Image (cartoon, rainbow, N blue to C red):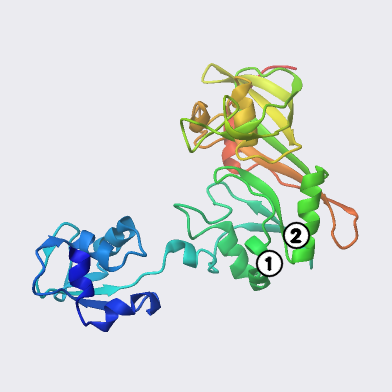
């Protein structure tokens, strides 16, 4: 067994591997009796606390030397080879690092920050997006947020949705905002461009959960662990773009489920323009889901007085709207 060969060695780096901090080097001299094995397989045995895929990434990035030369994933290593591994931090370990990130602050106080998030910016670090997020930018501009859970973020916007969200600057304010969300007293209004001529107004109450067949989607059809979701909508106008019918709608949320407006409008048969995940078409210049968080209202944690903010539509949405041939109402 490879593992038995390794453990029979006297090299102290093997016994104390767990105690060596990341970004330092570990050296492993392979035993003379060892039969050749793939480098990634050997490393997976030597450093079992890390996944093989992660170790393969280190090899590809040049962090693993075999006898002083950068190793290859599939190369064989064996008797008397010297492996030098420069340990790398997991991406989630550096997710809460301050970084300069471009976003607009609409207003702030000692207790809160109202942000106008641009489309394309991820709100919170996660798989595939461990840096360059709104959270990283908030920590850069407001260092005190390092002492607040999730850097004060209490609700999120999808990556390709733009508009307003509020961030708490201390734990007391964060608790206050979370309670407003739970009590459904925080006002969140959106505007969207959707496929088809949407009915005049209504309310969608279909529960939302993870799609059983497509993990990146949410669903109202046999969802996994569905949660209550309520969206009020009103058609503001309708017209045509590239001869396809479209509607301009206003949506108001009572709940805040992942992809809620996108899923509910899709369930109505009116997916958002540009929202290809939910069968929306990229008509005209709609290269993302046409969804804008235009209004945010809440009670100020310090005074309990109402505060309200509005954000103008971004340029790309204005360009799409300008290309629509609107019908007289």
Query: Would you say residue 311 is visible in this rendering?
Result: yes
Residue 239 located left or right of residue 55: right
- Tell me if residue 291 comes above or below residue 55 in the rendering: above
Q: Quadrant of the C terminus?
A: top right
Q: Residue at x 77, y 58 (%)?
A: 175
Crowding at label 2, few (<14), some or many (≥20) Cα neighbours within 10 Å? many
Q: Identify the disc placed on residue 70.
A: none
Q: Position of residue 210 (x, y in %)?
A: 55, 35
Residue receiving disc 1: 148
* Depth order, front residue of 98/51: 51
* Depth order, front residue of 114/323: 114
Mark sitting earlier along the chain (2/1): 1
- Tell me if residue 102 comes above or below residue 70 in the rendering: above
Which quadrant holds residue 323?
top right
Which secondary structure, mark 2? helix
Residue 307 located left or right of residue 279: right
Q: Position of residue 178 (x, y in %)?
A: 76, 53
Q: Residue at x 57, y 55 (%)?
A: 124
Total number of numbered labels?
2
Q: Quadrant of the N terminus?
A: bottom left
| Label 2 close to label 1 by CB (< 8 Å) | yes
Whole-number angstrom distance, CA of label 2 to CA of label 1: 8 Å
Which quadrant holds residue 239?
top right
Q: Position of residue 187 (x, y in %)?
A: 79, 43
- Tell me if residue 185 comes above or below residue 43 in the rendering: above
* Depth order, front residue of 14/120: 14
Q: Identify the disc placed on residue 174.
A: 2
* Depth order, front residue of 120/13: 13
């Amino acid at each position: 067994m490879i593992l038995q060969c390794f453990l029979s060695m006297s090299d102290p780096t093997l016994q104390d591997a767990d105690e060596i901090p990341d970004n330092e080097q570990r050296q492993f001299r392979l035993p003379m009796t060892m039969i050749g094995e793939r480098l990634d397989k050997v490393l997976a045995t030597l450093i079992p606390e890390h996944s093989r895929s992660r170790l393969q990434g280190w090899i590809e990035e040049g962090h693993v030397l075999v006898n002083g030369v950068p190793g290859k994933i599939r190369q064989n290593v064996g008797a008397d080879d010297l492996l030098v591994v420069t340990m790398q931090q997991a991406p989630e370990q550096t997710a809460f690092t301050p970084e300069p990130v471009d976003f607009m602050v609409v207003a702030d106080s000692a207790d809160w920050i109202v942000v106008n998030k641009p489309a394309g910016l991820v709100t919170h670090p996660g798989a595939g997006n461990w840096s360059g997020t709104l959270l990283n930018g908030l920590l850069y501009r407001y260092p005190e947020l390092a002492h607040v859970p999730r850097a004060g973020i209490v609700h999120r916007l999808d990556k390709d949705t733009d508009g307003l969200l509020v961030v708490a600057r201390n734990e007391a304010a964060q608790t206050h905002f979370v309670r407003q969300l739970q009590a459904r007293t925080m006002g969140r209004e959106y505007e969207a461009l959707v496929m088809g001529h949407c009915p005049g107004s209504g309310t969608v109450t279909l529960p939302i959960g993870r799609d059983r067949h497509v993990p990146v989607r949410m669903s109202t059809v046999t969802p996994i662990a569905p949660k209550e979701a309520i969206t009020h909508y009103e058609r503001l106008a309708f017209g045509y773009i590239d001869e396809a019918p479209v509607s301009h709608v206003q949506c108001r949320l009572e709940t805040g489920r992942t992809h809620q407006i996108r899923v509910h409008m899709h369930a109505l048969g009116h997916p958002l323009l540009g929202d290809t995940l939910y069968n929306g078409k990229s008509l005209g210049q709609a290269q993302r889901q046409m969804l804008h968080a235009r209004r945010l209202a809440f009670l100020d944690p310090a005074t309990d007085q109402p505060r309200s903010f509005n954000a103008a539509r971004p340029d790309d949405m204005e360009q799409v709207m300008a290309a629509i041939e609107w019908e007289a109402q």
